[in-house]
Amino acid sequence: MKKIIFVLIFAMAGLLFAGVQSVNAQTDGAFSVTFGWNDNNCNCSEPVTKWARVVITEYPGGGLVHDSNWQTPGSNPYTYDGDANLADCDDPCYTVTVYILYEDNTGPCCAGSDSANVTGQDLVGGYVFEDTIIMN
């Protein structure tokens, strides 16, 4: 009888441990971020090269999780698809920041950015910035 009780207690402890581990589980690494911008305030000369960059950092803390580097967005709004090792957190545990930069023949001529604190599931589910990024 004592062996059965010991085995049951051991099994329950194992299930409890497994449950605690799932709280800090990792999400699928594929994620997307959709954002749009308004360039009405820009004063650039043609031709203009448009750049976008998506950076994800830990929140709080600021450790780098993902950096898309500068890329040419294909449309406005634009959806960036990336891959990173993201935690499945209930509270915001990441800050996603989007940078938009326009360059003309003189160099940078207009820029804008926005950020939001999000969960890993927000990113995996496809995070959409609610506000349009205003460029100046």
Image: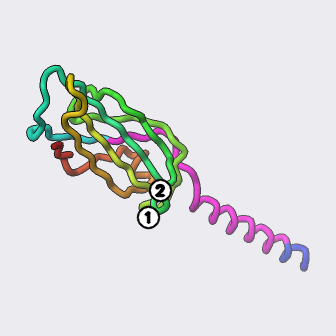
Image location (x, y in percent) of residue 34 = 29, 40
Residue 43 position by quadrant: top left
Q: Determine the residue positioned at 29% across, 46% down.
A: 128
Depth check: give the residue in front, 58 or 34: 58
Which residue is tagged 2? 62
Q: Which mark is residue 3?
A: none
Amino acid type, residue under disc 1 in the picture: Asp
Q: Secondary structure at mark 1?
A: loop
Residue at x-position 27% and y-position 50% = 114
Q: Residues under labels 2 and 1: Cα distance?
A: 16 Å
Determine whether, in the image, residue 102 is placed left or right of residue 80.
Answer: left
- Disc number placed over residue 91 in the picture, else none: 1
Q: Quadrant of the N terminus?
A: bottom right
- Residue 59, image x, y percentages: 45, 59
In magenta stretch: residue 69: no
Q: Which residues are magenta?
A: 7-33
Element under disc 2? loop
